[in-house]
Image (cartoon, helix red, strand yellow):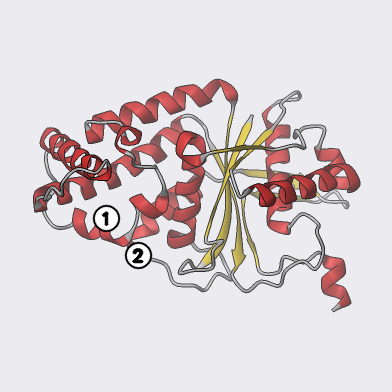
């Protein structure tokens, strides 16, 4: 099973929270899901988005402007909308290659906004059909940080829930973690932190029996499943709230936040006293420090 991971709000710009999101899918389902998404692109836009330089990212597809444009007119019939979207996207592509500016019509802009929202809805439907599971650590922007080089709590929580998912899937299920590529120095830091977690901590050592400790890094614009993690992270950041989360949401994003929430991993595990507790794939974190460091303060 693969866990594809991406982030939202790490730049501390306008985002309400920092989100570390992962989508888990079994290897036998991955290619079929990718093909289904590619077919959905052609069906809705009349063209593959990658062929005109458009990356499937939440920040680009689900920005507020998309919703405003989609609401400019009643729903456009699917065939006409597809033709308008293809024209709209190819104009932008030719301009990006150095061509002369090409004006867009209001109807083309409206068609593209409506198509984008239907596409994201369709992507979530496909994720559900292919049994994709969502994991996310939601972190306050001003959460106290680690004073050490240990793996951050949001990462360890994500790996813990993924480990439980592997246990639930089958007795022999192994997990591979795939990250959106960071700067090379950041990649090396994360690899070192994960290596320490899996080799020098009791829980990490236990989980290394199921999760391959060394992650893979890929370019998000070339990897469909990482783009899915990006859409999930953005949907959660702007459209979903758990208890204790007080930052405002964008009302138009609630639908997509709920869709991400509906795909979350859910299970149960006993504690040391034998009492069974629910385990959820989406977790809110207001302090990234380990308990020892918090107690010392």
Quarter of the view holding residue 10: bottom right
Contact, mark 2 vs mark 1 (Cβ under 8 Å): no
Q: Residue at x 22, y 45 (%)?
A: 95
Q: Residue at x 35, y 65 (%)?
A: 251
Q: Nearer the viewer, mark 2 or mark 1?
A: 1
Which of 142/252 is in front?
Answer: 142
Percent across and percent down for residue 188 are 72, 47
Q: Give the Cα distance between marks 2 and 1.
A: 14 Å
Within 10 Å of disc 2 (Cα), the crowding (few <14, some 14-19, many 20+) is: few
| Label of residue 66 in the image | 1
User: If the image is split into quadrants, where does the C terminus sit?
Assistant: bottom right
Q: Which mark is residue 101?
A: none
Camera-side residue of 28 and 98: 98
Residue 277 visible in image: no
Q: Quadrant of the N terminus?
A: top right
What's the residue at 54%, 64% (across, down)?
A: 11
- Residue under label 2, please give it: 251
Depicted 273 relative to depicted 14: above or below: above
Residue 128 vs 146, above or below: the answer is: above
- Secondary structure under the numbered disc 2 in the rendered image: helix
Residue 41: x and y in percent read 30, 33
Between 45 and 295, the residue placed more toward the observer is 45
- Residue 190 visible in the picture: yes
Residue 271 place in picture, x, y as percent? 82, 51
Image coordinates for residue 148, horizontal then vertical, percent:
82, 63
Report the number of numbered marks.
2
Residue at the image point whose x is 71% and y is 69% from the top? 287
Label 1: which secondary element: helix
């Amino acid at each position: 099973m693969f866990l594809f991971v991406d982030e939202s709000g790490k730049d501390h710009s306008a985002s309400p929270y920092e989100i570390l999101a992962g989508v888990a899918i079994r290897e036998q389902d991955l290619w079929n899901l990718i093909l289904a998404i590619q077919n959905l692109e052609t069906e809705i836009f009349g063209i593959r988005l990658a062929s005109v330089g458009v990356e499937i990212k939440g920040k680009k597809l689900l920005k507020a402007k998309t919703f405003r444009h989609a609401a400019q007119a009643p729903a456009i019939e699917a065939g006409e909308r597809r033709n308008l979207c293809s024209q709209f996207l190819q104009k932008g592509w030719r301009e990006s290659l150095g061509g002369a500016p090409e004006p867009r019509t209001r109807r083309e802009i409206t068609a593209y906004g409506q198509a984008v929202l239907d596409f994201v809805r369709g992507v979530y439907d496909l994720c559900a059909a292919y049994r994709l599971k969502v994991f996310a650590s939601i972190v306050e922007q001003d959460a106290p940080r680690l004073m050490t080089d240990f793996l951050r709590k949001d990462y360890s929580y994500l790996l813990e829930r993924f480990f439980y998912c592997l246990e639930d899937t089958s007795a022999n299920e192994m997990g591979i973690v795939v990250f959106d590529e960071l700067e090379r120095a950041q990649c090396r830091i994360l690899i070192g932190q994960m290596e320490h977690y899996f080799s020098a901590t009791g829980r990490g050592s236990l989980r290394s029996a199921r999760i391959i400790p060394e992650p893979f890094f890929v370019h998000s614009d070339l990897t469909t499943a990482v783009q899915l993690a990006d859409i999930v992270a953005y949907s959660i950041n702007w459209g979903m709230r758990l208890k204790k989360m007080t930052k405002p949401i964008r009302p138009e994003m609630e639908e997509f936040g709920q869709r991400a929430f509906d795909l979350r991993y859910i299970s149960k595990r006993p504690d040391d006293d034998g009492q069974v507790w629910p385990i959820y794939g989406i977790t809110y974190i207001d302090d990234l420090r380990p308990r020892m460091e918090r107690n010392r303060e």
